[in-house]
Image: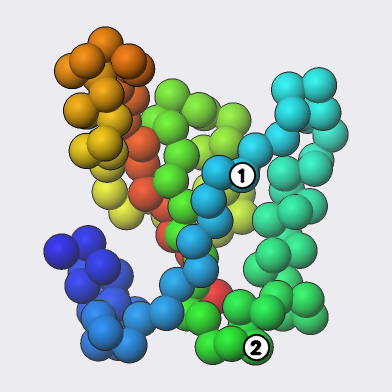
Amino acid sequence: ETWGEVAEAWGKAEEDLSLLYVWNFGVASTDRKRGIGQQVMEWLQSSETSRARVEGVDGIFLFVYRTNRPAIMLYEKLGYEVVASWQDPKWLKQAEKNLTGVERKILMIKKL
């Protein structure tokens, strides 16, 4: 249902919505607070370098742990919006077996 809502808000049919997924992005703890994450994300979305723009991608989305305030603040500063809270079903199964904890993520998206 979330993707349909995004598509509708952007004036597109859900099947025509084209999004780039940023997966597993992070900055080493020793290199944080130096602007590296911001530079990478700005490069990714810039019109001059973004293949996404050339390929006709409508926006960029990512998941971030809701407890990761520095990352959320960075993405908000770059124009991303929180769309939904999300819990990975695979993690739920692992948590039932005491293999991992369960931490909610939030879905953030930015229209290009």
Q: Is residue 2 found left or right of 18 in the rendered image?
A: left
Give the residue type that dot 2 points to.
Val
- Where is 58 relative to 2, above or below? below
Q: Is residue 32 found left or right of 69 in the rendered image?
A: right
Check residue 25 in the rendering and tell me which mark sits there, or answer none.
Answer: 1
Mark 2 and mark 1 in contact (Cβ < 8 Å)? no
x 65%, y 38%: residue: 26
- Where is 68 relative to 83, above or below? above
- Residue under pointer 2: 54
Check residue 84 in the rendering and tell me which mark sits there, or answer none.
Answer: none
Q: Secondary structure at mark 2?
A: helix
Q: CA distance from mark 1 to mark 2?
A: 22 Å
Q: Nearer the viewer, residue 63 or 110?
A: 63
Q: Nearer the viewer, residue 42 or 54?
A: 54
Can residue 92 be seen in the rendering of this structure?
A: yes
Q: Secondary structure at mark 1?
A: loop
Q: Position of residue 33 (x, y in %)?
A: 78, 29
Q: Position of residue 59 (x, y in %)?
A: 49, 72
Q: Is residue 36 found left or right of 90 in the rendered image?
A: right
Give the residue type that dot 1 points to.
Phe
The quadrant of the image that shows the N terminus is bottom left
- Where is 81 relative to 86, above or below? below
- Quadrant of the image occupied by residue 112: bottom right
x 20%, y 28%: residue: 93
x 36%, y 36%: residue: 105
- Label 2 crowd bin: few (<14), some (14–19), many (20+), radius 10 Å: few
Q: Position of residue 103 (x, y in %)?
A: 33, 24
Q: Position of residue 94 (x, y in %)?
A: 27, 24
Can residue 73 be seen in the rendering of this structure?
A: no
Say which label, 1 or 2, has the lower sequence index: 1
- Label 1 crowd bin: few (<14), some (14–19), many (20+), radius 10 Å: few
x 79%, y 80%: residue: 48
